[in-house]
Image (cartoon, rainbow, N blue to C red):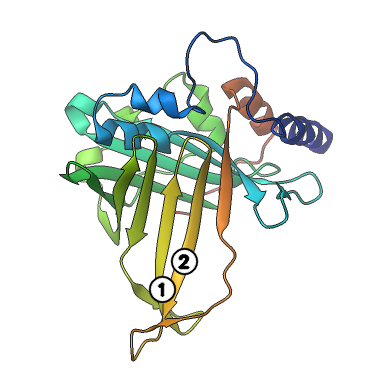
Amino acid sequence: MRYILLFLGLYMFSSCGSSKKVTKTTGPTPLDAEYYQNIDGNINRLHQLFQGTFVAYDENEGQWTVSDGDSVILYTQKLGEIAKDGHWIYNYDFMTSLPNEPIYTSIKKIEQIDRDSFAIIYYKSDKNYTMEEMLAEESFTGKKFNLDQLIKRDKKVVFVKYSASMFVGHSNTYEDKQCDCLRQNIYEITPKHYKVSAKFFDKETKKPIEKESRPNYLLRRDIDRKSLKVMTTGGKVSKKKNG
């Protein structure tokens, strides 16, 4: 199994070296800005930008974040029916060697504040899933989730539209006990990448302070369901961590 994962990982990372994966298409893909410009409504554009597969990349070193053939992948999929339930997202972060033991999972709902700004509200999951279970169906939807009964978490991020294909979000400022200061996370989503960075502030004065923090940078990649299923073959299923 490890050799299968290693081969798949190397193939995936080498194919990502080009600007985009070559596919048979007659129009723009989710890797193109034009794809989102053709979507009606900013909330629908943001919802679509969140969906897809993102692979960890070291922006400073200019190389894929790989260790012994292993890497981190963020798999994101919509939940429910937009017309009935609104704009929901399911996030699933995992190591390629442990696809059924996620690093982090979350459920989020996009709520419109005004034309160009949106609140991302986080919720606790009412049930845990593995990648294998998520891929077992053609459509992993809100049918398995009681969306109207989910409990809100004390976390919110406000995203603002910079263009039809770029949105930037800021979290509330909160105490980071690990660095003994206040912290605010900044999120940037585009057709090419998903980036999370941070600003730090003194707890007493609230003034900005310098702290070393390497951004969490992931590139959007066109990884099909078949390739994802190969990763889960023979995977060990265990209880998920909710964050």
Q: Residue drawn 26% across and 24% down? A: 40
Q: Amino acid at mark 2?
A: Ala
Q: Position of residue 172 (x, y in %)?
A: 30, 66
- Asked whether residue 146 is in view, the answer is yes
Q: Are marks 2 and 1 in contact (CB under 8 Å)?
A: yes
Q: Residue drawn 30% across and 37% down? A: 88
Q: Is residue 187 left or right of residue 39?
A: right
Q: Give the label on residue 64, or none.
A: none
Marks 2 and 1, how far apart in space?
7 Å
Q: Is residue 217 left or right of residue 82?
A: right
Classify mark 1: helix, strand or loop: strand
Q: Quick one: 129 or 28, which is closer to the camera?
A: 28
Q: Position of residue 2 (x, y in %)?
A: 80, 38
Q: Residue drawn 66% across and 44% down? A: 98
Q: Considering only vertical position in the picture, is 72 above or below 184? A: above
Q: Considering only vertical position in the picture, is 197 above or below 164? A: below
Residue situated furthest bottom in the rendering: 204
Residue situated furthest left in the rendering: 114
Q: Quadrant of residue 90?
A: top left
Label 2, on which residue?
198
Label 1, on which residue?
183
